[in-house]
Amino acid sequence: MLRIRKILLRGNSVQDAYVDFYKGANILAGESDTGKSYLVSCLDYILGAEKLKKKLKEATDYTHLYVEFENDEGGVLTLKRGLEGGKLEAHDVAIQDIHGEGKIIAPVRKGTSKGPDVTSILFPFAGIKEAKLRKNARGETQRFSIRTLAPIFLVDEVSIIDEYSPVTGRSGYDDTARKRMFSYILTGHDDGGVTVEEKPEIVKARLMAKLEFIQDLIRPLDERFSICSPKFPLTSSADDLSDQLIAQAIDEVERAAAAISDLLEGIKMETALTLKIESQLMGVSEIQSRYSLLEERYHSDLKRLDFISEGSHYFTSLQEVPCSLCGQNLLHPHSENAKKLMNSNEVRRSSLAEAAKIHGYLAGLQKAMSDLDRRKEALNIDRYKSKESLDGMKNQIKYTFEPLLT
């Protein structure tokens, strides 16, 4: 991952204005209208926003914004952008070491562009892989970008008090993409393998094209038989046979299209089930790790009780030591309470009672761990079956129905 090291504003004939950030949590405190929200706006702008949403009259003399990042490996990346908009410059050095122009990058990619942008520079620097996110119910996907990820960590005061989630935000055209982004962060699985469901009008147009193709194949035969000698007149049965063939072909195509639609719906359900199972497996693994730590704690407590019980038995064999304050031996009447507290039989009984209680807890914990193992095994079986079913449906579409429609 990465962290922000510095946000800096620079202009002509003005002193640089900057804020340094250090490892760990950084708290910026100040009164209202002192620029705290302006920093959030600057980060949103350097990460590809179309324009700087918040402007300060105190910043009118500044012309460029610099943001310096550092990754886990100690690498440095600085992004520079003019406050009036436009493209960015990427530099592989700290702000004070910048000399000349850097690599020109776009704020975001538009259309079918494959050029460098903030996402293509920042994600590899942070160790984040490229991913595809589903953007609608039909399975169309879009690129996982820094603009989709930004609401997770850029939360201003309005988002905090708003009744909407900072993750999904207000309802809009990008609801599905934001939810799939959050799912990708939690599970690590993107939507690159999701099959796109074709639009109904496209399927209908393809069927009509196939019908016209069949009719074009049959038309020369009709013309050929229509000029036959009266000696061999055409009968109504020939026309009926032609109509039957056309109807049969149309029926087969419609059945294939309906079967594909059902299979795509099944793939969608199996994909959702697989994601649910994998999420449950992650939860079970996390609980197992916590249970293992608790089991180690119980065993450590039992060893500690054994040590206390055995130590109390040998306590009376210790040599008498004079008190460092009064010089009297510890067996003097002023230490009678200590003798009572150090009674080996009492300590042993208390240790045995506490050990019995811990053994009871340990037995319950081991039973719970066994239940988790069985649950994990069942989930793995369900995941294997779901994956097998998913592969079967995809192969059925690919090798059985697609050849009929091509």
Image (spheres, helix red, strand yellow):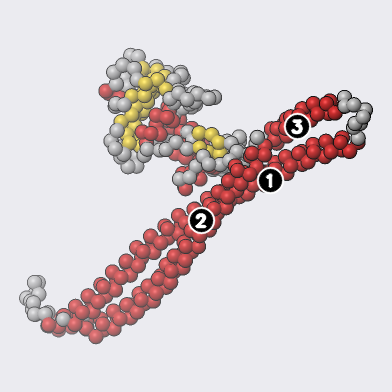
Report whether 370 appears left or right of 296: right
Disc 3/disc 1 C-alpha distance (Å): 21 Å
Query: Residue 313, how many percent across, how many down?
Result: 19, 82
Question: Which residue corresponds to the image point at 36% horizontal and 33% vertical from the top-left?
Answer: 125
First-in-chain label (2 vs 3):
3
Report whether 167 appears left or right of 265: left
Please tell me the numbered disc located at residue 259. 1
* Local secondary structure at mark 1: helix
First-in-chain label (1 vs 2):
1
**Of labels 1 and 2, the one closer to you:** 1
Residue 224 visible somewhere in the drawing: yes
- Label 3 close to label 1 by CB (< 8 Å): no
Question: Which residue corresponds to the image point at 77% horizontal and 27% vertical from the top-left?
Answer: 216
* Local secondary structure at mark 2: helix
Q: Residue flagged by tag 3: what amino acid is it?
A: Ile
Disc 2/disc 3 C-alpha distance (Å): 43 Å
Q: As rendered, which of 246 and 339 lies closer to the eye?
A: 246
Mark 1 nearby-residue class (10 Å; few <14, some 14–19, many ≥20): some
First-in-chain label (3 vs 1):
3
Quadrant placement of the N terminus: top left
Disc 1/disc 2 C-alpha distance (Å): 24 Å
**Of labels 3 and 1, the one closer to you:** 3
Please tell me the numbered disc located at residue 384. 2
Which residue is disc 3 drawn over? 214
Question: Which residue corresponds to the image point at 42% horizontal and 38% vertical from the top-left?
Answer: 129
Mark 2 nearby-residue class (10 Å; few <14, some 14–19, many ≥20): few
Query: Residue 162, how many percent across, how many down?
Result: 55, 40
Report whether 62 appears left or right of 299: right
